[in-house]
Image: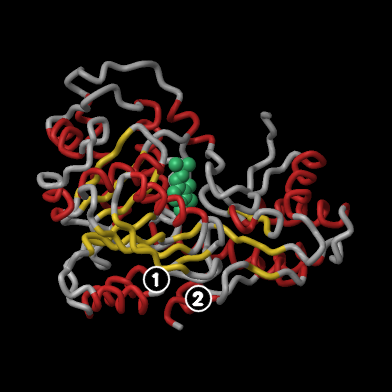
Amino acid sequence: MASPNPVFIPGPTNIPDRLRHAMNIQTLDHRAPDFVELMAPLLDGLKAVFKTTTGSVITFPASGTGGWEAAITNTLSPGDKVLVARFGMFSHRWIDMCQRHNLDVEIIECEWGSGAPADVYGERLAADKNHEIKAVLVTHNETATGVRSDIGAVREAMNAAGHPAMLYVDCVSSLASMDFRMDDWGVDLAVSGSQKGFMLATGMAIIGVSERALKACDTATCPRCFFDFRDMAGANANGGYPYTPPLQIMFGLRESLNMLLGEGLDQVFARHYRIAEGIRTAIAAWGLKLCANSPELYSDTVSAIYVPEGFDSNVLTKHAFDAYDVSFGVGLGQMAGKAFRIGHLGLMTDVMALSGIATMEMAMKDLDYPIELGAGVAAAQNYYRHPTNFANKQAA
Ligand SMILES: *Cc1c(COP(=O)(O)O)cnc(C)c1O
């Protein structure tokens, strides 16, 4: 179980030593007066990562799934209509959760490998003359297919339709790794978690909440107790927590924010882009295809890769684990057996990425995939020696 090798799964991610040490603390009294000195700066740091000045941040002891549930139950009532696109396993699971909370879910079915269709969102909203749709849900980074969607475009479509629905975004596998702009994009609820871009243990749901979303708590009637925003925000405002806080993760988060904001968010995003590009260069050298339909959709945190016809991706990921003690992501949902995933977010360097590429090459060669040993490694080495400038790419 305790391999010294990095994992190449898109969460939970590798934990830097610096953060493991920061989480190694003795129990503290969360009712002691100095708890506020820990809590308040965390929320400020998280606001910087969400890029919000007008919104607030609410955390819960939970995984990202708990964050979804908190976002939904605090702001919606049974029977409320929500509009959501399905293009992968995570958007699917969010839809399933909405249905189980008895929301009226209007689904935009999309091909897996495509991104959130801003134009279709716009059409459906324009057709909703009575403004029955209360919320628009979008998965920023679909971790099952390695697709990043354009949230700004969805916001523009909402504005163009003149529709007052709130915008809910799943940014669990993008926040703190790829650019996310809560205020600029007019996001009302942004759901994330501790174990991906923040490089921490699992156990904290992290939610950006707009002023409007916070007000919606007063009229929303979905049952909630543990996840009540008002209990948490109220307690936090007085330097407290409504129940026992996940202290170890909070100490880790303090250090994680130091790392991320110390490196600079732009540098963090540029690093993720560079590492991802190297891996994509290797995938191309193998002659394999990404699930993501087109380059503007490529995720910088996870790549989902189709195996050639006649091969089973589950056999490949199992072999990589059995033979080399390295975990890669399996294909999820309709990708099962057809694709594997390389997670490349959080603690990751060019050198770590090269080791993952080399391992995957060995595993594929062992199973008689039509690839040359070293082809992907060499392609990535060439890229990492002279990476394309991120700033130029942004401007293009
Ligand atoms: C990881 C992830 C989640 C949340 O999963 P948990 O296991 O509950 O933390 C939600 N959405 C996306 C896109 C994810 O990648």
In 3D space, how far apart are the residues under numbered discs 2 and 1 (Cα atoms)?
9 Å
Cβ atoms at labels 2 and 1 below 8 Å apart: yes
**Picture quadrant of residue 376:** bottom right
Q: Which residue is mark 2?
A: 296
Q: Is residue 118 left or right of residue 310?
A: left
The quadrant of the picture occupied by the N terminus is: top right
Q: Nearer the viewer, residue 193 or 313?
A: 313
| Residue depicted at 30% across the width and 77% down the height | 122
The picture places residue 254, in percent across and down from the top left corner, at 35, 37
Q: Amino acid at mark 1?
A: Asp
Q: Which residue is mark 1?
A: 150
Q: Secondary structure at mark 2?
A: helix
Above or below, 243 against 341 in this view is above
| Residue depicted at 29% across the width and 42% down the height | 70
Q: Amino acid at mark 2?
A: Glu
Q: Nearer the viewer, residue 203 or 355?
A: 203
Above or below, 98 against 16 in this view is below
Circle 2 Cα neighbour tier, 10 Å, few/some/many (<14 / 14–19 / ≥20): few
Q: Nearer the viewer, residue 212 or 262?
A: 212
Q: Earlier in the sequence, mark 2 or mark 1?
A: 1
